[in-house]
């Protein structure tokens, strides 16, 4: 994909009110190499095929989606929303979809993540307070002057189960300014130990697409994201942190952050 494809993809998403992270240009561009996405796009709609030969369900007009469904019988489709399943059943009445929980997206209220008010954030506030109390902490937004520190963190980062590889994170950093991303770097004792970044994907939604850390100090992950969320503009209503990739640890962390809802996903064979 090229950066110039952004206008086509985002215009289609905006026209058909499609706000999942999975189909955003940011996601398709950053994870293109990792998942082997081959994107076919026009002014009327778009879809993506991955390296396994499976497809992201298309975004577009009813005619565009109907043509896709009928021309891809026998193919597996995923990242389907409830309304996508219903539409497919209108074209193929015996279509059966199954929940794809590993791909469901966690969505949070920006206002809640900034205020951390209420009983449900009691543990988060306690961990954050302890982190600041027990460590010499500094946070900086990512700029041209310090982005090298984010690269250094990524170079030292080792993925845990379910965290994927470094390709998407590398591509996000390489295109940070061209994509108009924003991010935060956390330092302990002057050393860069964690960063996170993301971008506005439209419709009042911010996609958090990369978070890496090289320290196991409790509270670091919370701090890095919290400091980024505080910098987001008021027009951002929701923060989409994508899926948990089937990792129990990531699922626990995402639920601890108290999502306001999930973008439930389904998959099936046309």
Image (cartoon, grey):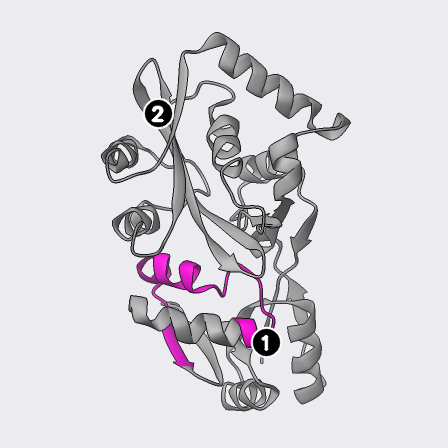
Q: In this view, does 37 lie to the left or right of 247?
A: left
Viewer-nearest residue: 52 or 41: 41
Q: Is residue 53 at all visible to an observer of this figure?
A: no
Classify 71 as above or below 129: below
Residue drawn at point x = 27 percent, y = 37 percent: 147
Is residue 174 covered in magenta? no
Residue drawn at point x = 66 percent, y = 22 percent: 123
- Total numbered labels placed on residues in the image: 2
As drawn, which residue projects farthest toward the front? 234
Q: Is residue 71 left or right of residue 92?
A: left
Residue drawn at point x = 59 percent, y = 40 percent: 251
Label 2 packing within 10 angstroms: few (<14), some (14-19), many (20+) = many
- Quadrant housing the C terminus: bottom right
Task: Provide the residue span drawn in magenta.
Answer: 14-41
Q: Is residue 241 at all visible to an observer of this figure?
A: yes
Q: In the rendering, at what x and y percent does residue 198 appear?
A: 43, 47
Viewer-nearest residue: 40 or 138: 138
Residue with the mark numbered 1: 16
Label 1 packing within 10 angstroms: few (<14), some (14-19), many (20+) = some
Q: Which of marks 1 and 2 is nearer the N terminus?
A: 1
Q: In the rendering, at what x and y percent does residue 259 appear?
A: 66, 43
Is residue 37 covered in magenta? yes
The image quadrant that residue 28 belongs to is bottom left
């Amino acid at each position: 994909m090229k950066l110039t494809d952004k206008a086509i993809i985002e215009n289609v998403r905006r026209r058909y009110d499609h706000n999942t992270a999975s189909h955003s240009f940011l996601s398709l561009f950053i994870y293109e190499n990792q998942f082997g996405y081959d994107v076919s796009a026009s002014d009327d709609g778009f879809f993506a095929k991955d390296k396994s030969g499976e497809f992201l369900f298309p975004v577009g007009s009813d005619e565009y989606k109907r043509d896709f469904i009928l021309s891809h019988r026998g193919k597996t489709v995923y990242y389907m929303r409830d309304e996508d399943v219903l539409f497919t059943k209108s074209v193929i009445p015996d279509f059966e979809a199954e929940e794809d929980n590993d791909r469901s997206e966690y969505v949070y209220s920006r206002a809640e993540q900034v205020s951390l008010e209420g009983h449900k954030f009691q543990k988060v506030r306690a961990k954050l307070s302890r982190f600041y109390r027990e460590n010499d902490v500094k946070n900086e937004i990512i700029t041209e002057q310090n982005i090298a520190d984010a690269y250094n963190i990524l170079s030292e980062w080792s993925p845990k189960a379910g965290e994927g590889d470094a390709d998407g994170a590398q591509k996000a950093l390489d295109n940070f300014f061209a994509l108009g991303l924003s991010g935060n770097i956390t330092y302990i004792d002057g050393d860069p130990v964690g960063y996170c970044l993301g971008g506005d994907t439209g419709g009042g939604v911010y996609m958090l697409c990369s978070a890496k850390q090289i320290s196991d100090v409790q509270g670091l992950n919370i701090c890095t994201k919290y400091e980024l969320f505080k910098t987001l503009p008021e027009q951002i209503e929701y923060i989409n942190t994508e899926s948990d990739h089937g990792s129990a640890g990531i699922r626990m962390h995402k639920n601890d952050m108290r999502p306001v809802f999930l973008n439930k996903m389904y998959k099936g064979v046309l």
